[in-house]
Amino acid sequence: MSTQLVAPSILAADFSKLGRDIEMINSSNADYIHCDIMDGVFVPNISFGIPVVEKVAEVAKKPLDVHLMITNPDHFIVPFRKAGASILTVHYETCPHLHRTVSSIKNEGMKASVCLNPHTPVHLLDDIISDLDMVLIMSVNPGFGGQTFIKNTYQKIRELKELIMVKNPKCLIEVDGGVNFETGRNLYEAGADVLVSGSFIFKTDDPIATINKFKTL
Ligand code: DX5
Ligand code: ZN
C-alpha cells in the first residue's frame, strides 16, 4: 500500500492573497507545500523565485517541496536551502553532473529529488536511484498549471516502483501535473506516494476538503 501524501502547488494560488492560501494549506491535511520555480529558459514560463519562497517559509507549517524548473540548478542549491526548502527537486534534463548535484543538495541538509520530463525514460535513473530521497515524475510537460494528464505516466510509475523496490525501497515517488481524484486514485494504485495538485485543489469551493480527500482516495 502506498503512503498517500499530498502536496498542493501554490502555482495555482491567488498571489495577491498568498498568505491566506498558505494558511489554508496549513490548516489542511497536506503533507508538503509544492513551490514551482520556472526560469523562462528550461521551461517556457516564469513563475516566482527566492524572495517569494522565503516569505512562504515564514508562514508555512508544512515542509517546502521546491521544484526547480531552471537551467544551472547547482547555482541555486544554497539560496533555496537558506530560503527554507526541505525537499529540493532538480530536473534530470538540466544536470550533466547529476551525482554531484544530488550530493550537494544532501550536504546542505535537504532531501534530494530528481524529476523526469514525460519523454525521459525511467531506466536513466538506474545509477543514481540509491542516492535519492524522491523521484518526481512529470505527468504533463512542465511550465504551466491546468494541463491534461499524460496517460503513459502510469506505466512509468510501475516501472519506477520496480526499480525502487530493488535498489532503494525508501525512495518516494511523486507525480506532478493534471492530478485530480480520478488520476490520483490510479496513480496511488500504480505506486505513487506523493501527489502534487494545483488547479484542481485551488478551483474547488472547499480546497481543504479536497486536500483531505486526496489522503483517503
Ligand atoms: C507544472 C508544475 C506543476 C503545476 C501542476 O510545470 O510543475 O506543479 O503546478 O499544476 P496542475 O495540478 O494544475 O496540473
Ligand atoms: Zn511542480
Image (cartoon, helix red, strand yellow):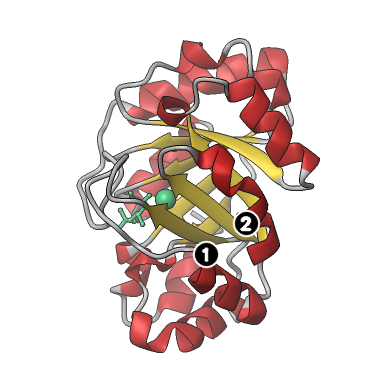
Quarter that holds the N terminus: top right
Q: Could you say whether the residue bearing mark 1 is in a helix, strand or loop? A: helix
Image-quadrant location for residue 132 = top right
Residue found at x 37% / y 65%: 11
Q: Which mark is residue 79?
A: 2
- On whether ligand 2 comes within 8 Å of the CB at mark 2, the answer is no
User: Which class describes the residues within 10 Å of circle 2: few (<14), some (14-19), or many (20+)?
Assistant: few
**Residue 183 appears in the picture as rendered:** yes
**Residue 193 appears in the picture as rendered:** no
Residue 9 locus on image (x, y percent): 43, 62
Residue found at x 31% / y 75%: 204
| 28 sits to left or right of 153 | right
Label 1 sits on what residue type? Ile
Q: Which mark is residue 124?
A: none
Whole-number angstrom distance, CA of label 1 to CA of label 2: 7 Å
CB under 8 Å between callouts 1 and 2?
Answer: yes
Q: Could you say whether the residue bearing mark 2 is in a helix, strand or loop? A: helix
Sequence-wise, the earlier of marks 1 and 2 is: 1
Residue 137 locus on image (x, y percent): 44, 34
Residue found at x 32% / y 82%: 205
Q: Compared to 138, does 96 lie above or below? A: above
Q: State the residue in front, 109 or 34.
A: 109
Label 2 sits on what residue type? Pro
What residue would you read off at disc 1? 50
User: Which class describes the residues within 10 Å of circle 1: few (<14), some (14-19), or many (20+)?
Assistant: some
| 213 sits to left or right of 42 | right
